[in-house]
């Protein structure tokens, strides 16, 4: 019986090691694939976009159908270019090859500017007058813009969005809460994965690449912070971003 127990434990250990190795191999394979696809697609996409632009400039003598075809090519090429650029940006952030321009910034000002740029009247804010953090202002503005855009896209036209920024447990905490379609309970752990799109989103025909949350997660991790998602009763999602405060605070 003792030998059987030892053998069982060894079997479990070996299975776990194999699982861990397979996970690492799959992660490396995915990273290599994204890197390869990104670089190999960028050049032909640039060529297609340039030629489509030339055709559009000289399309006045073409039929309406041909002009429409050129517009479709240009539009879809731009979509794929944005996805490729995002993939390469994400790969650079996660590998550490993309540097950040870190400085002392006012996070409250960044959030205020993002809300103003969104131009939506149904956004309620609870912000301090000033909240300093150390970070890359362009990258943190990118995160706030993307998270706010998600909240708007997945909410009804008249749905209210609540944004709060405060200090909690020596962290700057930003929460963006919407009353939209939310994320299915059994999919929460996957919400920050590359290419993740909720099953309820796909069923409603809302377009997207599934890279926005992963990119926000990568940027905040480079700032030594965290991104988490919770349900917002009765419907919707609360995204929480936590960043460390400057040492001098």
Image (cartoon, rainbow, N blue to C red):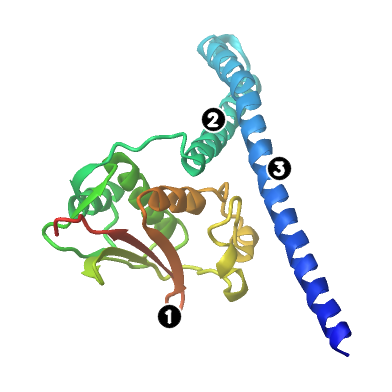
Are discs 2 and 3 less than 8 Å apart at CB? no
Q: Residue 29 carries which label?
A: 3
| Residue 201: assigned label | none
Q: Which of marks 2 and 3 is nearer the N terminus?
A: 3
Q: Position of residue 127 (x, y in %)?
A: 18, 63
Structural distance between the alpha carbons of marks 2 and 1: 37 Å
Decide: is 31 above or below 195.
Answer: above
- The residue closer to the viewer here, 6 or 76, is 6
Q: What element carries label 3?
A: helix
Q: Mark 1 points at which residue?
A: 233
Residue at the image point whose x is 64% and y is 64% from the top: 199
Sort mark 1 into few (<14), some (14-19) or many (20+) by Cα contacts within 10 Å. Answer: few
Secondary structure, mark 1, is: loop
What residue is rendered at 14% in x and 59% in y? Answer: 249
Q: Earlier in the sequence, mark 2 or mark 1?
A: 2
Q: Quadrant of the N terminus?
A: bottom right
What number of labels is visible?
3
Query: Looking at the image, which is closer to me, 95 or 238?
Result: 95
The crowding category of the residue bearing disc 2, from other C-alpha atoms within 10 Å (few below 14, some 14 to 19, many at least 20), is some
**Considering the numbered disc 2 on the image, is that residue within a helix, a strand or a loop?**
helix
Residue at image point 55% right, 30% down: 81
């Amino acid at each position: 019986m003792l030998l059987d127990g030892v053998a069982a434990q060894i079997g479990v250990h070996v299975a776990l090691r194999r699982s861990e190795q397979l996970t690492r191999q799959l992660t490396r394979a995915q990273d290599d694939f994204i890197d390869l696809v990104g670089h190999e697609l960028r050049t032909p996409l640039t060529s297609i976009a340039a030629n489509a632009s030339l055709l559009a400039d000289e399309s006045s003598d073409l039929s309406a159908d041909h002009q429409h075809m050129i517009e479709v090519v240009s539009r879809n090429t731009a979509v794929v270019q944005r996805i490729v650029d995002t993939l390469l940006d994400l790969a650079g952030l996660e590998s550490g090859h993309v540097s950040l321009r870190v400085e002392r910034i006012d996070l409250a000002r960044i959030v205020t500017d993002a809300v103003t740029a969104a131009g939506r009247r149904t956004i309620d804010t609870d912000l301090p007058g000033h909240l300093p953090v150390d970070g890359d202002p362009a990258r943190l503005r990118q995160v706030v813009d993307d998270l706010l855009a998600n909240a708007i896209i997945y909410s009804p036209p008249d749905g209210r969005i609540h944004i709060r920024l405060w200090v909690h447990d020596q962290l700057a905490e930003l929460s963006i809460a919407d009353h939209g379609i939310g994320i299915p309970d059994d999919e929460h752990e996957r919400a920050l994965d590359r290419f993740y799109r909720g099953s309820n989103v796909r069923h409603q025909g809302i377009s997207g690449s599934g890279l926005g949350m992963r990119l926000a997660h990568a940027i905040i991790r480079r700032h030594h912070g965290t991104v988490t998602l919770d349900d917002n009763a009765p419907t919707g999602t609360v995204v929480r971003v936590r960043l460390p405060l400057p040492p001098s605070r």
